């Protein structure tokens, strides 16, 4: 598709606290919210959505700073603000109860929603989620913190750099990084305001809430690639289940959509409530 930077036929928008959020919604059944990671978009869950939409009402937003949602005017990209925005987004849609799954940054936001709005969640799935202070920062994010390079990255994000970051984020056997994937990421990053928003996000001083993770009471499934370490959700969340993929990379929902979808469907089962559409 050559128009990733424009709305698609199934695109929807809703305003939440002055921010126009782009999202897609497909399927029938209990509500399931899918949250993508940083420098990504709701297309990250395209294949997983196809596999789950027969059983779930799948809702995917473009998170602020990314995709067709784009930057926040106040440039506030703290994780608690993301969690508040996502909760407000679902309230605006009239969805009172939902399961939530997130990859990377999306997982970080998801467990923050679980802390702040536990009664709304029917289940929590963390896919290579972040949130512990010892998490290694990817090279691309470290580059945005260089005061000499930062102004340049606000004006241009080289396609080659995006391709390198994608290839570094997947497992050794993954074949998903092709011209279409790189083109999608580059076009979305090149939308007006998105480059600067990404730089602002990477330079945001995030509060450390990891000490509160053991307070999460929502039933939780942790999906982790064996190569990903430094995250201890299965250890710290009471009763959490964990599945480990032997050779996946950071982008499991795109690398192994069937594995991720099967794990989510089996875990949620009848746990989620039927949403009010």
Image (spheres, helix red, strand yellow):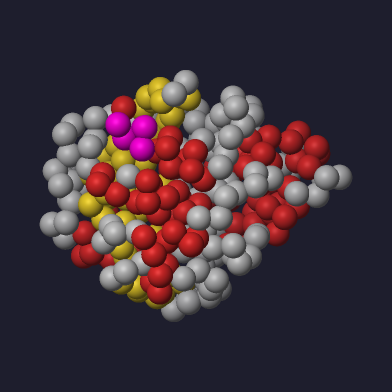
Locate residue 233, reporting x and y percent. 42, 67
**Rendered view: 87 above or below 259:** above
Q: Is residue 201 magenta?
A: no
Q: Is residue 47 visible?
A: no
Locate residue 224, reporting x and y percent. 43, 69
The answer to which of 163 and 232 lies nearer the viewer is: 232
The residue sitting at the right extreme is: 148
The answer to which of 10 and 70 lies nearer the viewer is: 70
Residue 194, quarter of the rendered image:
top right
**Rendered view: 225 above or below 208:** below
**Rendered view: 129 above or below 147:** below
Locate residue 230, reporting x and y percent. 55, 71
Q: Residue at x 39, y 64 (%)?
A: 214
Q: How many marks?
A: 0
The answer to which of 4 and 139 lies nearer the viewer is: 139
Q: Residue at x 43, y 35 (%)?
A: 85
Q: Quadrant of the C terminus?
A: top left
Question: In the picture provided, is 251 more to the left or to the right than 29?
Answer: right
Question: In the picture provided, is 155 more to the left or to the right than 41?
Answer: right
Q: Is residue 250 visible?
A: yes
Q: Which residues are magenta?
A: 87-91
Q: Main secondary structure of the magenta part?
A: helix
Q: Residue at x 50, y 60 (%)?
A: 210
Locate residue 29, reporting x and y percent. 15, 45
Q: Residue at x 42, y 30 (%)?
A: 22
């Amino acid at each position: 598709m050559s128009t990733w930077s424009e709305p698609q036929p199934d695109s929807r928008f809703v305003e939440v606290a002055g921010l126009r959020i782009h999202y897609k919604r497909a399927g029938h059944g209990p509500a399931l919210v899918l949250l993508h990671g940083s420098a990504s978009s709701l297309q990250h869950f395209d294949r997983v959505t196809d596999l789950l939409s027969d059983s779930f009402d799948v809702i995917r937003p473009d998170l602020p700073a990314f995709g067709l949602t784009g930057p926040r005017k106040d440039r506030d990209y703290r994780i608690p603000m993301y969690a508040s925005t996502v909760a407000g987004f679902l309230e605006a849609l009239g969805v009172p109860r939902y399961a939530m799954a997130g990859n990377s940054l999306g997982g970080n936001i998801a467990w923050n929603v679980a802390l702040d709005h536990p009664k709304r969640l029917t289940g929590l799935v963390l896919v290579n989620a972040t949130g512990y202070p010892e998490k290694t920062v990817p090279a691309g994010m470290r580059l945005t913190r260089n005061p000499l390079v930062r102004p340049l990255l606000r004006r241009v994000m080289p396609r080659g750099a995006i391709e390198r970051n994608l290839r570094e984020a997947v497992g050794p056997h993954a074949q998903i990084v092709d011209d279409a994937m790189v083109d999608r990421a580059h076009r979305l990053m090149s939308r007006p305001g998105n480059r600067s928003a990404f730089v602002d996000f990477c330079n945001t001083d995030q509060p450390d809430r990891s000490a509160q993770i053991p307070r999460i009471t929502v039933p939780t499934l942790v999906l982790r690639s064996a190569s990903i370490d430094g995250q201890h959700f299965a250890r710290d969340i009471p009763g959490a289940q964990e599945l480990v993929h032997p050779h996946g990379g950071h982008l499991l929902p795109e690398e192994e959509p069937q594995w991720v979808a099967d794990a989510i469907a089996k875990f949620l089962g009848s746990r989620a409530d039927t949403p009010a559409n």
